[in-house]
Image (spheres, rainbow, N blue to C red):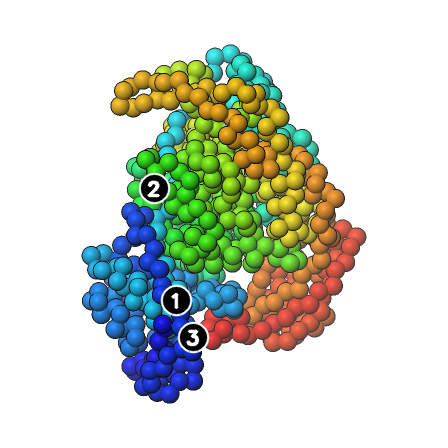
Amino acid sequence: MKIRYTLIFAGLGTLVCSAFLACSRIQTQSPEPEPQLPVFGEDVVRGELLVRFDEGVAALLEESGLTKSGPSNVLTACEIPSVEEVLAIVGNYSIERVFPLDVRREELSRREGLHLWYRVRFDEDAPMEQVYMELSRLGEVSSVNCNRRLKKAYSGRSVPFHIAKAAAGTVAAGNWNDELFPYQWHLVNRGDLGESKFSAGADVNVEQAWELSSGDPSIIVAVLDEGVDYTHPDLKDAMWVNEDEIWRSREDNDGNGYAGDVYGYNFSLGTPIISTDDVNDSGHGCHVAGVIAATNNNGLGISSIAGGDGSNPGVRIMSCQIFSGVKGGTVLDEVRAIKYAADNGATVLQCSWGYTSGAANAYDWQPMYSSDEAWMADNALERKALDYFIHNAGSPDGVVEGGIAVFAGGNESAPAAGYPGAYGDFVSVAATAADWTPAVYTNYGPGTTISAPGGDQDYYWNYGEGSERGTLGCVLSTLPLTVSPSGYGYMEGTSMACPHVSGVVALGLSYAARLHRHFKASEIIDLLYSSATPVEQYWNIDEPKYYYKYVTDLGTNYRNSMDLRRYAGGMGSGQVNASAFLRAIEGSGVEMTFPNVTVAPGSSVKLALRTYFDNLSGASVKVDDGSIAEASIVSGKLVVKGLAEGQSSAVISADGKSHRFVISVRSNLSEGGWL
C-alpha cells in the first residue's frame, strides 16, 4: 500500500502534496499491488536507480536548481523525509535529473512527463534490491527502473579490407565511380562474386531507386552506436552539423542542454567529443554510418544507400555515441540520446543493440524479455523515451510527423527477436545472406518485422583466404583508420542488416521531400513493410543450408546445417526493397503546407526551404508587421528574428508558388521562461 506524506524541504519552504494537511500521514483510498523485484542480473549497473518522482518532489528538486544533468548539477541531500528515510539505507547518495534542460523543448518535455525522471546514485555495495523495493513503495515515486547495460548486436570484430585478397576473379562495374562499390553485393548484387551462394538481385534493390532519389540533407539519421568518425574521407561530408553550436565550446550556445555538440554528443563519456580511437573500439558506428550515407560518386571508397550522387548531397548522420571502448552503453545513455535525437531534428533512429532474445538458448545466453509486458514492466523510462521519439520527432508541417526507430533483431539464432525492437511500434530487422537465405546467426519469428542483408561469414567460408575467409559474404563499409589502415572493412550481423533498413527509410523520406509530400511515421512503416520482397520464394526449403562453424578451442571448422523450414514465415514482411518503397511513396501522403514559426524576442530560427520549393532562385519573404519580426533568405534557409512579442502574418514566394504563414514572438521561449 502506498503512503503519501507532506514534504518539507529545508530552506525552501513547505509543499503540501495532494491537499493533505501538514505533518499528516494519510493512506491512499485504494491499495496498490506490492511492487515486483526485477531480475538483478549482470547487465544491471550497481549503485544507481532511475526514479520517476511525482510533481511535488520534482518541483522541490527544481527549486534547488536541479534542472540540468551532469556532475556539476547534482544534489547530495534532498531533505524530503520519505525519500531521505529510504536512502538512509545507503549512506551517501546523489540525485541528478535524467534529461537536461533544453530551453527550446522544455514545454514539450514537461507535457510528456520527462522532467520527473531522476538518477539516484549511491555506493555500489549498498543493498540495491532493498532500496529498489523501498522506493517503489513510496507514494511520491511512481516508477523505479534499473539502469541496465545494453547489448551490442555485434561481436565487435571487423576485418580490414585488402583489395588484393578480397576475391579471386572479376567483379562488375558499379553505378558510381566509388572504387569499392563492386564488392558491395548488399547494395547491388549481380551474382558475380561467387558461385550459387551469390544470387543476382539478392540485395536492397537500391539501383533503380537511385533514379528517383539518392538522398537529401534535410533528412537526419541518428546513429546510436560507437562514435562516427567525422574526419573520415567518405563520411565527413555526410555529418549532421549543429550550426548553432561552437566546436569544443564549454558553453551551451544553443540552449539544448549540451555544450559543444557540433556533430552529435558522446553520451557514454559525457562529452561533445565523438571518439573512435579507443583501443577497444571496433569502428561499428562508422560501419553503420557508411552503409546509410557514405558520400557517393566521390571517386574513393564505398557507396551507400542515401549518400547523394556527387552533385546533390545525401542524408545526414547525427552521431549519438552510447558505446566507447570497453564502456558499454546503458539505458541512461540510451534515453538521453533518443531524446536528443528527437529534439535536434533526427527522424530515423538507427539502433544496432538491444537485449538478448527471451527465446535464446539459455546454455549460451542469458535470455531476457519474452513479452511486451515483461519488457515494459522493467523499462518504463526506456519505453517513455522511445515513445517521445516516435511521437515527437519530425514535424506536422515537414516530410514526416513522428520518428521511425529501427532495431537489430539480435544474433542468438533464436526464434524470437530481442527487445526493444520486438515491440510493435518499432522496426525489428533480421539478417539475410547474399542468396536470400537467413543468416546462420539471425533471430527470427515473433517480433521480427523485416529483413535485410547482414552478411554471413560462416556460410561463405570457402570464399576468401587465410584469416579473412568468408568475408566476401559480409558487409563492406567504412571504418576508422585506427581500426583499418584502408579506412574500410567487413562486418556481419543483424546490426549490419539494421542500417540497410534505416538507409532505405532515409532514402524514402528524401524522395518524399523531393515530392513535397507529408507522411505520418506509421504510414512510412506500413509502406516499408508492404513493399518488401518475400524471401521464401528463393529458398530450396526442403534442403538444409550448410555452413562452417569455427570452434576456437579445437582450432578447426565443422560443417553444420540449418533447417530453412524453421524460418518459414519468420523473416518479417520480407527483404527491404528500396525501389518498390520509393514507388509506393509516389502515390501516398499529402501535400506539405508551409509551417508557422515561433521565436523568442531577440532570437532567430532557421528553416530549410528546399523541403517546400524545388527552385529557390528569386525567392523572397515579406513580414506584414515589421515591428514584430524580420525575415530573410540566407543560403537556402528562411531566417526569422523575433523583435517584439506578438503575431504577424508573412508570405514567402519561390518557384512560382506563394505560402502565407504566421510568425509568433513569445518571450516565454527564452531560457527559464518555461518556469
Q: Secondary structure at mark 3?
A: loop
Q: How many marks?
A: 3
Q: Residue at x 66, y 64 (%)?
A: 596
Q: Position of residue 458 (x, y in %)?
A: 42, 23
Q: Amino acid at mark 1?
A: Pro
Q: Are marks 3 and 2 in contact (CB under 8 Å)?
A: no
Q: Amino acid at mark 2?
A: Gln
Mark-to-mark CA distance, 2 and 1: 28 Å
Question: Where is 203 relative to 139, above or below?
Answer: above
Q: Secondary structure at mark 1?
A: loop
- Label 3 belongs to which residue? 30
Q: Nearer the viewer, residue 527 or 396?
A: 527
Q: Amino acid at mark 3?
A: Ser
Q: Which mark is residue 366?
A: 2
**Location of residue 137 by image quarter:** bottom left
Q: Residue at x 66, y 51 (%)?
A: 519
Q: Position of residue 254 (x, y in %)?
A: 48, 61
Q: Nearer the viewer, mark 3 or mark 2?
A: 3
Disc 2 or 1, which lies upstream in sequence? Answer: 1
Question: Where is 291 relative to 266, above or below?
Answer: above
Q: Is residue 248 left or right of residue 662?
A: left
- Label 1 belongs to which residue? 33
Which quadrant: the N terminus? Answer: bottom left
- Badge 3: how crowded within 10 Å, few (<14), some, or many (20+)? few
Quick check: can you spot residue 12? no
Q: Residue at x 51, y 41 (%)?
A: 446
